[in-house]
Amino acid sequence: MQQKVLAFATMCVGMFIALLDIQIVSASLRDIGGGLSAGADETVWIQTSYLIAEIIVIPMSGWLSRVFSTRWLFAGSAAGFTVASMLCGMAWDINSMIAFRALQGFIGGSMIPMVFTTAFYFFPGKQRVIAAATVGALASLAPTLGPTVGGWITDHFNWHWLFFINLVPGVFVAVVVPILVKIDRPNLNLIKDADYFGIVLMSLFLGCLEYTLEEGPRLDWFGDHVILATAWISGLTGIGFIWRSMTYAHPIVDLRALKDRNFALGCFFSFVTGIGIFATIYLTPLFLGRVRGFSALEIGLAVLSTGVFQIMSIPLYSWLANRVDLRWLMMVGLAMFAVSMWNFAPITHDWGADQLMLPQALRGMGQQFAVAPTVTLTLGGLAPERLKLASGLFNLMRNLGGAIGIAACATLINDRTNLHFQRLAEHLNAGNEAMGQMLSGAGSSLLAWGVDAGSAQAGALRQLWTLTMREAQTQTFGDVFLCVMACFVIAFAMVPLMRKVTPPKAPSADAH
């Protein structure tokens, strides 16, 4: 058992650094862009390339682990991820950085679903609940801590260390996993019957979908010819991939597992929690940067409370999970996440770490109580021979939910900001006494600094525009948080449809 715990902990380290790297650059893109002489349009691809590569490989990880074994695939992924991280830190221009980030995401992505399946291979009974709680906590905690860790590293060292910090844990995982993890054997014969056409369809479907979702809000969606083309490619190849997976004898992803009610609902809950986790990680730093003007470190410290409260809630969840129906705990988690979003809604332009404490505390605890039981209820009842392929699909849904959630939030922010600005501007007319006093005071201040009358008037109007835009953006963030809340209310209402999970009694077909 000690060897299993050490092996599992080592694999968790690999999963954690792979998930952490999704968001570790989010608060430091401006610094990286400056170091590589790249514009904002180019630096966006530092994150997009990683996400596209990772979302393609995650559903393939089940098949890959059957071919190469969990042991060697995980070790190879950790080693490749470490080398790619070193190359990212040594990148000499934006093109090399984008290429190395894509390589990092593609090689490292396999580590994420393999930890989920290993938890169910290694641990029975009550130990399985604790293992699932740990995996669920890390899956939601790592991207939450990404901006905090990234902001701190960038402020105290430089952006190169965002990638160099992966070297020591990466080497450790690559060395220890082959020694301790021995749960299955390679089966290279699977390469002969592999569904290569299905792999191509899936890669085009997920890659184009991720590109469309990431770049759509920035490029005016279907008004851009490239976005329109990738959306069509994604839609057509997606239909082809579903047809291929349902008809081919040895599909790359086990879509047939969706016939199991718990698994289908679990994928839905994974999708919704992905929306909540990644959308709030996107929204909160964006608000603090745009409206409050916080630095990368200040943003990281302000959102740190989410991770702290999630860690604090792990022992409570582990104690309750062996005594209370997991469906009740999931409902509590989803409800806490919804209440957290409700508490975000009355946000004002002067909110900082103190005001964010309560909603982020509720969100942190909600993540733990929502994600961990979802893992157990979704994967815990599947037969071992189906677990690998199904785990990739389950983890894909979380990342897909995050991608769609961020794209929807970005679109809402653009549209609702314009709407709120226009509504506020309607009241800024000659009859508005407060506005007149503000312009007069601002103009007088500028005149006192020796500015001529015309420039003073223009400066006062610029200040008015800035204040109006700030308030429009703030109201928009409140609207978007309410939309995220609505997703969790729907998920909360669907929890009773899940059945109690009964672990399969059959041993793994390839375990030894």
Image (spheres, rainbow, N blue to C red):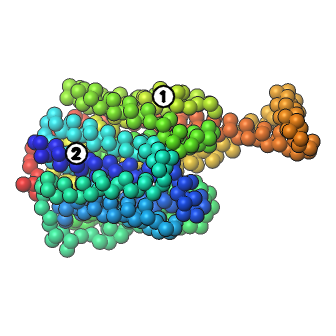
- Who's the residue at 66% across and 42% down the image? 417
Horizontal and vertical percent position of residue 249: 22, 66
Please say whether residue 413 is visible from this viewpoint: yes
Compared to residue 8, the image places residue 36 above or below, namely below
In space, the residues marked 1 and 2 are separated at their CA atoms by 30 Å
Please give left or right for residue 381 compared with residue 35 in the image.
Answer: left
Q: Mark 2 points at which residue?
A: 9
* The C terminus: image quadrant: bottom left
Horizontal and vertical percent position of residue 498: 28, 36
Task: Pick whichever of labels 1 and 2 is earlier in the sequence.
Answer: 2
Please give left or right for residue 482 compared with residue 385 in the image.
Answer: right
Q: Which mark is residue 54?
A: none
Please give left or right for residue 283 compared with residue 418 in the image.
Answer: left
Element marked by disc 2: helix
Name the residue type under label 2.
Answer: Ala
Compared to residue 500, the image places residue 82 above or below, namely below
Please say whether residue 432 is visible from this viewpoint: no
Q: How many marks?
A: 2
Of residues 186 and 80, the one nearer the viewer is 80
Q: In which quarter of the image is residue 310?
A: top left
Crowding near the residue tagged with mark 2, few <14, some 14–19, many ≥20 C-alpha atoms within 10 Å: some
- Who's the residue at 41% across and 42% down the image? 145
Q: Quadrant of residue 277?
A: top left
Compared to residue 508, the image places residue 368 above or below, namely above
* The N terminus: image quadrant: top left
- Who's the residue at 42% across and 42% down the image? 144
Q: Name the residue under label 1.
A: 357
Horizontal and vertical percent position of residue 25: 47, 52
Crowding near the residue tagged with mark 1, few <14, some 14–19, many ≥20 C-alpha atoms within 10 Å: some
